[in-house]
Amino acid sequence: MVTQRKVIAVDGLAGSGKTSIAKAVAARLGFAHLNTGLLYRSVAWLILKYGINPEVEAGIGDLLRAHTIELRLDPQRGGRAIVDGHDVTDQLQKPEVSQATSQAAQFRTVREALHATQRNAFPGNNLVAEGRDMGTVIFPDAELKLFIEVNEQVRIERRLKQLGLSIPADEAGQARLKEQIRMEIIERDRRDESRSLSPTLAAADAVRIDNSLDPLEKVVGQICSIWGTRQASKF
Ligand code: DC
């Protein structure tokens, strides 16, 4: 008998807090945390390393055929991105990598090349799979699908913290900076939600989770209780 592993799909826009949520839910349930952004970031890392034009799909296709990208589960540190046998995880959060990732993630060649790697990652483990199209494309059969949402104000504050910018002392300066960040978020969302392949959208059967106000433990508790109820209702 083939035992199908259990999958919780977690999707959401940038800055929604889905990584913290996915990691904590996985730890609580004893599932592996599959962060698919690491795979897209690895593609961008290769693009930058070999000086490939991130806007030319054919060149990226050649690059992907010549190199290997995989995920390995480290018992202490979780999922690691392995490119041509080397662990590159710690190099993947640089701004230039993020920038090239969002360009490369639009291409069919890239999305198709990573499809099976995501589907087959961490064999034998139940998964909390996090990304942009987990519930819609990669794990349409997931037992639970979540779409994480957060209000604009919270995302602006989080992005400010992430960028580590010094906050102007005067109110007008603060307002200008916040407006700048707000425009950046709107533009990024527009790109993510409107791309023709795998746009970031909630699956029709996804549970929407508001991550604006409650502390992480509360949100994680809420999700684990939804999971528990779903599992119990199967018997
Ligand atoms: O989640 P993240 O910030 O690590 O994602 C980095 C980029 O990869 C972002 O531009 C969206 C893209 N991505 C994607 O298109 N599909 C995924 N499943 C995961 C990430």
Image (cartoon, helix red, strand yellow):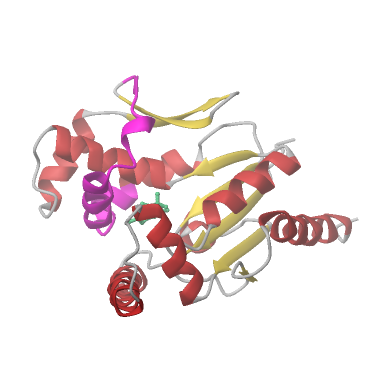
Q: Position of residue 7 (x, y in %)?
A: 64, 49
State the image quarter where residue 123 is shown. top right
Q: Looking at the image, which residue is at 72% across and 54% down?
A: 217
Q: Magenta: predominant secondary structure element?
A: helix
Residue in the foreground of this view, choosing between 194 and 142: 194
First to last magenta residue range:
85-112
Q: How many marks?
A: 0
**Is 147 positioned to the left or the right of 81 in the image?**
right
Q: In the image as oriented, which residue stretches furthest toward the right? A: 235
User: Is residue 139 among the parts visible in the rendering?
Assistant: no
Q: Which residue is at a point 26% across and 48% down the rendered structure image? A: 95
On the image, the x and y values in percent for residue 103 come to 22, 56
Question: Where in the figure is residue 49, as x and y percent of width and height?
Answer: 16, 32
> What residue sits 64% from the left and 53% below the top?
8
- In the rendered view, does 201 fall on the left or right side of 135? left
Left or right position of 196 against 123: left
Residue at 10% over, 52% down: 56
Looking at the image, residue 20 lies above or below residue 177: above
Q: Name the image quarter holding the C terminus.
A: bottom right
Name above or below for residue 173 compared with residue 164. Answer: below
- Quarter of the image that includes the N terminus: top right
Q: Indicate the position of residue 203 as horizontal and vertical percent values.
A: 54, 70
The answer to whether residue 213 is visible is yes
